[in-house]
Image (cartoon, rainbow, N blue to C red):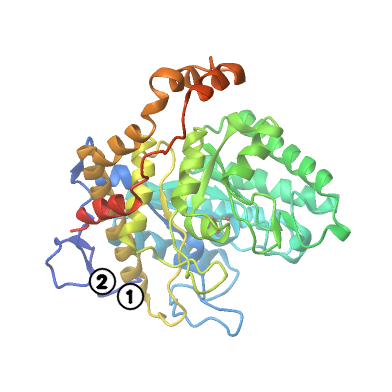
Amino acid sequence: MSQEHFPGIKKIAYEGPNTKNRLAFRHYNPDEIVGKKKMKDHLRFSMAYWHAMKNPLGDPFGGGTRQRPWDDGSDSVENAKRVADAGFEFMQKLSLDYYCFHDRDVAPELGDLQASNDALDAVADHLKKLQKQTGIKLLWGTACLFSHPRYMQGAATSPNADVYAIAAAQVKKAMDVTHRLGGLGYTFWGGREGYSTLLNTDMKRELANLAHFLHMAVDYKKKIGFKGQFYIEPKPREPSTHQYDSDAAACLNFLREFNLLDHFKLNIETNHATLALHRVEHELNVAANAGALGSIDANTGDELIGWDTDQFPTNIYMTTQMMLQLLRAGGFKTGGMNFDAKVRRESHEPIDLFHAHIGGMDAFARGLKIAHRIIQDGDLDRFVKTRYATFDSGIGKTVTAKKATFESLEKHALKLGDVVPASGRQEMLENLINDYMD
Ligand code: XUL
Ligand code: CO
């Protein structure tokens, strides 16, 4: 790392909640112990290469606004290496211990597949060197199967077998590189795996092709000895009208139907949950209940705009709810908290990238500490347990033990008068959560 890409910005330090320095952590103190682990081991923060390093910040009405002095926009390997240098300087200055990339974020897509593969290999050598120098790890890799025009009708669900073959070759290469870089995981986000109209779509056939694609990935993983975790990242719409991996429940059903559940966990993204009309804690809970909560793409959406705005998460109530789910599920094993988020188009200066990540990291540090205290105190969990207490004794216990039948329940019901369940006490519990928000 020869040249400094963020001159004037020192390594961001923890200075506590009363500091006036906007380039400091107020809550994220990486080595502070919360429960049994350091904060950094609970949160496992990761930089999303595509947003932090590459996103020019265009929108449907205008082009990019962002100053990225580290990227000359050329398709050269030299440029890609300089972008990587900037990325690793950025991660070091922010104490981001992990990063995630698509093949086409780190290296250019060139005229033919072989040339693109060669460029990717050359940049991967450089990334390996940077990882070694800094100790920063690859959380997961993935392949971009959605930007190139050939993928306009999908990749693993394309109606064209040649497109399907190119997508397979691209994933094979991205898995090789992820493996070579010691990646802890590999993500499949559906990209354009979905459809716009059933008038031209054989959904059954497309899903069978997608399942076979994922089975081939599982086979290849074994073949090359890649031990990283596979993830599927649900998203309901955008870019397609109907995305096949529409939410956590749909993904789990697909994985079960095609015998893939043992090989995949889910990567849950907040703004995707919102687009599916779910709270992110719902999606995390659905995944955790199936033993499939793998990783998190941390961001948030603007509730007044109907698309995937990928904003940095700053809402402490939301991060608290997320951390409650994560802690109850036993925390991350292979996954981490990947900031799949971009600064606003108006925030075009390099320093804005620091403010954005500092805010997100502090918001999750607070959420972690608050959620830990809520769990330690136990009042919330005790309330929930008590709410279901009728299933712990008497007739309810026969249900829990799966001994009940319609006849046995009818016999019991006939003896009952009218029954009024206890209050759900939502407002009291919302007040209880507020008590922790100091
Ligand atoms: C798109 C999205 C992707 C995946 C990786 O909405 O979230 O960036 O995280 O392909
Ligand atoms: Co994502």
Q: Earlier in the sequence, mark 2 or mark 1?
A: 2
Q: Position of residue 281 (x, y in %)?
A: 44, 49
Tell me the kind of residue under disc 2.
Ile
- Residue 403 position (above or below residue 11): above
Identify which residue is drawn at 50% across, 20% down: 412
Q: Are marks 2 and 1 in contact (CB under 8 Å)?
A: yes
Q: Give whichever of 356, 142 is nearer the camera.
A: 356
Q: Which mark is residue 135?
A: none
- Nearer to me, 114 or 152: 152
Q: Residues within 10 Å of mark 2 (few under 14, many from 20)?
A: few
Q: Is residue 148 left or right of residue 197?
A: left
Q: Which quarter holds ligand 1? A: bottom right
Residue 334 drawn at (x, y percent): 43, 38
Kindly tell me whether mark 1's CB lies below 8 Å from ligand 1: no
What is the secondary structure assignment of the residue under circle 2? loop
The spot of residue 16 in percent (x, y) is 14, 60
**Which of the two marks, 2 or 1, is nearer to us in this view?**
1
The quadrant of the picture occupied by the N terminus is: bottom left
**Left or right side of 42 for 78:** right
Q: Is residue 90 above or below residue 392?
A: below
Q: Which residue is mark 2?
A: 9
Q: How crowded is the residue under tag 1: few (<14 C-alpha within 10 Å), some, or many (20+)? A: some
Residue 118 picture quarter = bottom right
Number of numbered discs overlaid on the protein picture: 2
Residue farthest to the right?
199
Residue 3: in sight, yes or no?
no
Can I make out residue 240 in this image?
yes
Quadrant of the rendered structure where residue 198 is? bottom right
**In the image, which disc is placed on residue 351?**
1
Q: In the structure shown, which secondary structural element does the residue marked by tag 1 occupy? A: helix
